[in-house]
Image (cartoon, rainbow, N blue to C red):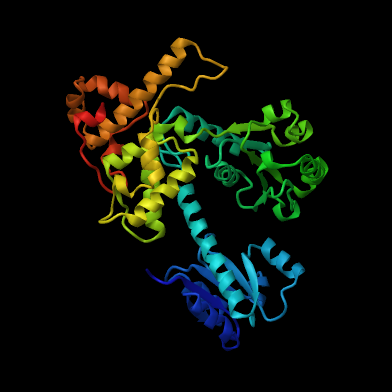
Amino acid sequence: MNRPQALVVGGNPRAWTGLLTALDAAGIDARVVADPHAAQVMSLKGPIDLVVVERQYFEDPGIGLPAGGSEVPVVVASDGAVTEEKITAWLARGAFDAVEVDAPGWRVRLIADRALTERRRRLEFARLQRLVGEASGVIPFVGSSAEASRLRERLERLGATDRPVLFWGEPGTGKEFAARLLHTRSPRGAHPFVPAMVQHGEVEVDLDGARGGSLFVDGLSGLTPRGQEQLLQVLDPGRVREADVRLLSSGTDDPGLLVEQGRFSDSLFKRLGAELVKLPALRERTEDIAVLARHIVEGIAALNRLDAAVIEPAALDALERYRWPGNVWELRNALEHAAIVSADGRITLPNLPPRVREGALAPGAADDAPELGSDLPRFRVAKRKVIDAFEHRYLGKLMRGHAGNVTSAAEHAGMLRSALQRLLRKHGLRSADYRASIGGGIERVGRAELT
């Protein structure tokens, strides 16, 4: 695999010997240039994964940063001590971090490693953002299920407003992704998105750091009563207006229920939950798993500069039968594991983690019946839901098995071609989507696998 590329911009590169040596030890190739204007040109000649720029150039508005795209982290190199005041100002201007020119090698390597991790995260997020305009949607909300479609439409509408939004749902459903997506689709998209994580029942919030952008408070369900009171004081409406910040937040439990049970402050709920958005569990939208898996495999391949692997039918069937307690992010982890251990670019059933293989075989793993809680639906509603889920799953496997050929698929299913087309339209499925492979290829399935 190719080594990461860094562009180092400084007026006296010879004074940076230690920093350059540390970058090399971290496995990073550095291209050094003393002229910041020349750096603009050099950065266009190849991919740049990291920019290290001398403080004076970073602070000069007339020079500007080297081109490379918003996905490239910028580290400011200072010939003096990096104080809290300085780094706060640099971070506000878009820097990822800062380091002294004569910093010890271990510190340079640590910052470089963090920056490259951030680079990979930004590239992945940018790739996901580009999917927003596609008919299939955006990970983790890609798919044609009613749940995914409703969520995308809701996020699109909320993106045009400035109201506080509280996302809730099980771990791994994509709450932070939804918040980031909402931010980027809003008029505040060019301003900071600042996460604040609840730790040990409390949370530290930096309103100034989010000025003009969005503050995202994650983990509300874990706030202690003291932490809730502190957060309520910090998010005083006057202070929020002064900082010009949009409030976004998330939790794993139904916030309304927590308020009813006396476990969450009603005042804080009203301040954060002007709009509530529930993210569905993956087991509630199993018909989306095939296309989700394809996008995830393609993303893994792109990040590692590899060809996308083919998911064989038996493996895909297991993915659709498993209950996914960790939701979309557990699916991603399972596919990353499978891609690593697979051979010849094919993900087979044995490549999947044991918990997925075993869970897919558990009784009731693929039960499409709705969960019957205290809010028992009417019989006709529950029956329609089961039939719809079966039809969607059957049609997906049928069209995959015939590579999107409607005539061949209709003959296999014993249906009129026009009847199959009506069903496909009903479920929002397009034959063209099945002419490409699941992750680069497709396998023909037999009649027994569709029943």
* Residue closest to the far bottom: 14
Q: Is residue 436 left or right of residue 446?
A: right
- Front position in the image: 239 or 382: 382
Instruction: Evaluate whether residue 404 shows in this view.
Output: no
Instruction: Evaluate whether residue 408 shows in this view.
Output: yes
Relative to 145, residue 330 above or below: below
- Front position in the image: 171 or 304: 171
Relative to 190, residue 397 above or below: above
Q: Is residue 423 left or right of residue 42?
A: left
Spot occupied by residue 451 in the image (x, y as percentages of width and height): 26, 26
- Front position in the image: 382 or 273: 382
Picture quadrant of residue 55 = bottom right
* Residue closest to the far top: 379
Spot occupied by residue 294 in the image (x, y as percentages of width and height): 36, 45
Spot occupied by residue 359 in the image (x, y as percentages of width and height): 40, 37
Q: Residue at x 61, y 37 (%)?
A: 252
Q: Is residue 64 left or right of residue 387?
A: right
Q: Which quadrant holds the N terminus?
A: bottom left
Q: Residue at x 77, y 68 (%)?
A: 85
Spot occupied by residue 215 in the image (x, y as percentages of width and height): 68, 47
Relative to 201, residue 103 above or below: below
Total count of labels? 0
- Front position in the image: 149 or 318: 318
Q: Residue at x 36, y 57 (%)?
A: 340
